[in-house]
Image (tube, rainbow, N blue to C red):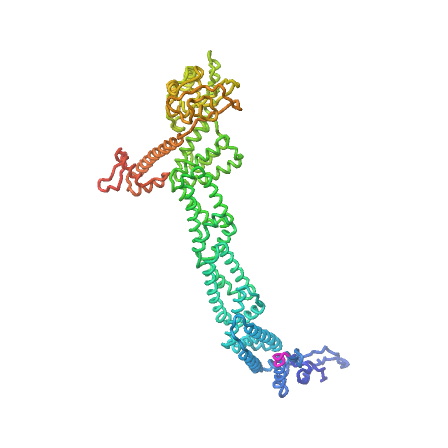
Amino acid sequence: MADEPQKKPHLSALVGHTNGLSKPASLAATATRAAGGGGGGGGATASSKKLVIKNFRERPKLPDNYTQDTWQKLHEAVGAIQSSISIKYNLEELYQAVENLCSYKVSATLYKQLRQVCEEHVKAQILQFREYPFVMHRNSLDSLLFLKKINKCWQDHCRQMIMIRSIFLFLDRTYVLQNSMLPSIWDMGLELFRNHIISDKQVQTKTIDGILLLIERERNGEAVDRSLLRSLLSMLSDLQQVYKESFEQRFLEETNCLYAAEGQRLMQEREVPEYLHHVNKRLEEEGDRVITYLDHSTQKPLIACVEKQLLGEHLSAILQKGLDSLLDENRISDLTQTYQLFSRVKGGQQILLQHWSEYIKNFGTTIVVNPEKDKDMVQELLDFKDKVDHIIEVCFQKNEKFINLMKESFETFINKRPNKPAELIAKYVDSKLRAGNKEATDEELERILDKIMIIFRFIHGKDVFEAFYKKDLAKRLLVGKSASVDAEKSMLSKLKHECGAAFTSKLEGMFKDMELSKDVMVQFKQYMQNQSDPGNIDLTVNILTMGYWPTYIPMEVHLNSEMIKLQEVFKTFYLGKHSGRKLQWQTTLGHAVLKAEFKEGKKEFQVSLFQTLVLLMFNEGDEFSFEEIKMATGVEDSELRRTLQSLACGKARVLIKNPKGKDVEDGDKFIFNGDFKHKLFRIKINQIQMKETVEEQVSTTERVFQDRQYQIDAAIVRIMKMRKTLGHNLLVSELYNQLKFPVKPGDLKKRIESLIDRDYMERDKDNPNQYHYVA
């Protein structure tokens, strides 16, 4: 059998001359040669060789004292690392030594010995801190020096454990990993540092006191070593529960006390905007501390603590002290900050909502309730609505709760004074839609009408608005003073969309009458051309359907013969086309254009019918007394006085009053002013309004109340007809649902009694609170 070359041993860990371990004897390998059977001449043919490699029959033995000698080397290396001196041995050689020891089942002993060496070293470190002088003075440098020393100790310890672990890595990844009860070499180092240094009561107290003192100084505006704080707090976090149990609890308690005192003090010293700016600054600072050196887990309780002490404890006080002034002065940035800060605190938005609502109600009430502000009420309401809308959009991030509460608050205050806002809104619309309003373009007018509709929605008594709007619309249509038919139709469309077709049916009827009247007048003019004596007066008539238009009280006056004749001609023409209809002339609505001659030349006057009757008298004479004019015209006394005032005491004085004075008295004489001068050719002489508007308001309001009674009666009968039998409370509840205007329970009770008296319904004989419908 031939000898084969030496083979490498199976254990790669023992290859070569490493760490005093001799190269073992080579493994003998045998190769068998197959003898081939030969024939004939008996010559052997060579066959291919087969190589077989076998394991050691016995495990190679470690040289004597190998374990002890190797540990000695490792011990020296660990000592050199801990003493920060150079290591005599090659690191790869040391790593290989650990691997060899682990391979020969001495891992447990090795781990135990390593722990013991590390523990002895850490124990020795504690002495420098116990002997270190440390007095807690606010301006003392001792605390800072101590913190730097503990930080250096920690940094050294971490660096040493990283080096030690790199040498004992094989032990860490095999033996330690397989024994779940054992901490890794790094964790063992942390455990030793925690148990023997940081858990020392004196060292821990000094460390945490020093850290808290540094943080306090930083909060007071001093510059501190943030990297030192970051390193120390990272150390406490790495040492598991030390950060939570020993540092964080005390840190949050001190933070709580600091901001509680600061909140109380600054609320007294500062105005609300300054205070909120300070709160925001503090929150940013604390957020920055979390990012820079505190553990991330501290963020939530820390920020909650600041919010509670600087905001949560003072929510009502902040709003009572400063919200009204912020809103009055329209401080957008400060209001934005208020909303953002209050949104961070539990219950903050809710209390802000309450104060927001109260502000709107109080401010709005001052606009609505004061009669002296009636002239500007609607414009002030529109401006106020624009202002709160802007605040909601920019400051309150279009929060639905704030929008809804704003609407409720507007509805509350605008109805504190029943009917008047509705009337004034109608008059405001009239002022915008009347000709001569050159303030706005068509687009601006449309925007104004949209804004008015928003205010209109808040009003309960919409029937009051309808009555006044109808009265003003009638004037605009009849006198031809509407600024734009498109704008009128647009407003009508908005009202129809808001209140339904029933609300605008009469208003639409008024427009229809005006259009039909134009057609009638075209036909009448053709009719007049066929007459033998067409006359000198050009007559235009508007035929109004009585149910659509406001109620006008007819006034009998003495028209001249030519006017009466023309009226009869039109009456014959119209009734000839529409038999069965009745025409009633409304002299109060009539107007005319008169041609007059003065010394200066010819003029035209645009005047009312009553002014026309007075002026036409002066074709018969130059001077008339008040009594003579009254007898000749038949105009009612107070109306005549206003008419004469407009002609003799206004800007265009066509008549001269004797004696002079603003008021028309009995016995006053009026003379035609032949010397009348005016720069215009056509002059409009307005009727003096005086107290007429007040009378109109009263009569319009009374008509609204009368209409309401009819509507209540109709609603009661409608409900009872459907239900047949109903209890009082259920009937009242159903009425509130159906009626679109505010009504008191007492008024409903009166209407129910009225209907019982008129036999529309009856009380139940056994239960007086039960009603039956009478068919």
Q: Nearer the viewer, residue 638 or 676?
A: 676
Q: Nearer the viewer, residue 668 or 682?
A: 668
The image quadrant that residue 734 belongs to is top left
- Say whether residue 568 is magenta: no
Which residue extends farthest front? 659
The image quadrant that residue 102 belongs to is bottom right
Q: Is residue 554 above or below residue 186?
A: above
Q: Nearer the viewer, residue 533 or 701?
A: 701
Tell me: 624 left or right of 10: left
Q: Nearer the viewer, residue 301 or 191?
A: 301
Residue 452 appears anywhere in the view = yes
Q: In terms of secondary structure, what is the magenta stretch mainly?
A: helix
The image quadrant that residue 774 belongs to is top left
Which residue extends farthest top? 532
- Residue 670 at x, y = what percent? 42, 20
**Residue at figure coordinates x 67%, y 85% from the top left:** 22
Q: Is residue 278 above or below residue 216?
A: above
**Residue at figure coordinates x 42%, y 34% from the top left:** 501
Residue 580 appears anywhere in the view = no
- Residue 45 at x, y = what percent? 75, 79
Q: State the quadrant of the N terminus.
A: bottom right
- Residue 252 at x, y = what percent? 48, 66
Which residue extends farthest right? 41
Q: Is residue 667 above or below residue 60?
A: above
- Say whether residue 82 is magenta: yes
Tell me: 641 left or right of 133: left
Which residue extends farthest left? 766
- Residue 77 at x, y = what percent? 63, 81
Q: Magenta residues? A: 78-84
